Image: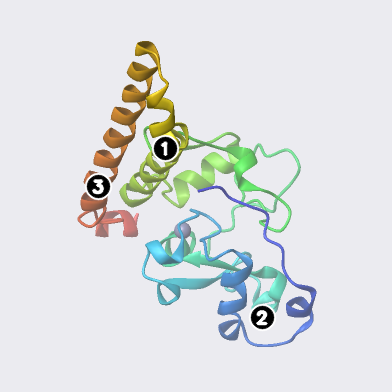
Amino acid sequence: MNWKIIVKSPENLLTERLYQECKEDLSREAEHRCIYCCIHESRFGGIRNFHVEHYKPKSKYDKLKNTYSNLFYSCSICNCFKGNDWPNDPDDVYEKPFYPDPLIVNYSDYMMVDYETGFVEGLRKTTKYVVEKLYLNRPQLVNERKFFGLMEKMRLNYQLLENIELRMSNASQEERIRVMDLFIKATSAMREISQLQIKLQTVNPYTIVQVRR
Ligand SMILES: [Zn+2]
C-alpha cells in the first residue's frame, strides 16, 4: 500500500471534456487506487464507489472544474472528508497544512506506515494534516495495512520454505528446526490473515459522527 506520483498521459491532458467523463482514465493513471488512502478499488466497492477528485476544490476554483491536471481518483470516503478543504497552497517547506500535489510529490516520502499496527503517521506538518483531515487511520484502512503486512510476511516465509523437501532430505537437525520454525510462522500469518478477512467484512469504514466531524 504505497503511494506513488501520478503520471498523466499527455493525450488526456490535452483532451477537453467534462470531469465526469474522465473517471476511467483517472483510475488507470492511479493504478486503481485512491490517491490519498491508497485503497485499491477492488477492496472497496469498485469504480462506482470512487469519485473524480478535484485537487483544488471546484467550489473555490471553478475555472479548474474540468482541467485534467486538477483531477484525480479518490475513494468516496477520502473525497467526502476532503470536501472543499484547501487550507493553503503547497510550498517546498512542508511545515503548514496543505495537500501535496500528487503530480509532483510521492506521499510515501512524507508518510510512515507501520504494517504491524496498521497505523500511518504524517512525517511533516502537511502530511500530519492530511492524515488527520482525511482520517487515514480509520478502521478499514488500519486493517488493510495489517493485512498487507501479513501477506508480505507470509510471502517472505514461503519464499524461504521453497524447496523444503530438498532442504529437509539433506538437513541437519538444526536446519530442520529452523525450517519448522519458518513453517509455523507462515501458517500463523495465514491464520491471522483469515481472521482479519472476517474482521474486514464486519468493520465499518467510518461512523456517522466521523463523517460529520
Ligand atoms: Zn481514500
| First in residue order: circle 2 vs circle 3 | 2
177 sits left or right of 26 in the view = left
Q: Earlier in the sequence, mark 3 or mark 1?
A: 1
Q: How would you rate the neighbour count of disc 2 (Cα within 10 Å): few for under 14, some for 14-19, many for 20 or more?
A: some
Q: Give x and y (percent) for residue 124.
A: 60, 35
Q: The residue tagged with tag 3: helix, strand or loop?
A: helix
64 to the left or right of 31: right
Determine the image quadrant of residue 183. top left
- What separation in Å lies between label 1 and label 2 (alpha carbons)? 48 Å
Query: Mark 3, mark 1: which one is toward the viewer?
Result: 1
Q: Residue furthest front?
A: 169
Name the residue that disc number 2 marks.
66
Front residue of 156 and 56: 156
For label 3, the residue is 194
Q: Nearer the viewer, mark 2 or mark 3?
A: 3
Q: Position of residue 30 (x, y in %)?
A: 60, 64
Marks 3 and 1, how far apart at CA: 17 Å
Residue placed at 67% from the left, 60% from the top? 6
Label 1 beta carbon within 8 A of ligand 1: no
**Residue 91, x across and y down, in percent:** 74, 46
Q: Nearer the viewer, residue 121 or 196?
A: 196
Closer to us: 1 or 179: 179
Give the mark, 1 or 2, whose residue is nearer the N terminus. Answer: 2
The quarter of the picture where residue 152 lies is top left
Tell whether label 3 touches label 2 (CB within 8 Å).
no
Give the class, few, some or many, for how many residues have Cα within 10 Å of label 3's Cα (few <14, many ≥20).
few
- 32 left or right of 158 in image: right
Q: Residue at x 46, y 35 (%)?
A: 156
Q: Specify the color scheme.
A: rainbow
Secondary structure type for disc 2: loop
Q: Quadrant of the C terminus?
A: bottom left
Percent coordinates x, y for residue 190 in the rendering: 29, 41
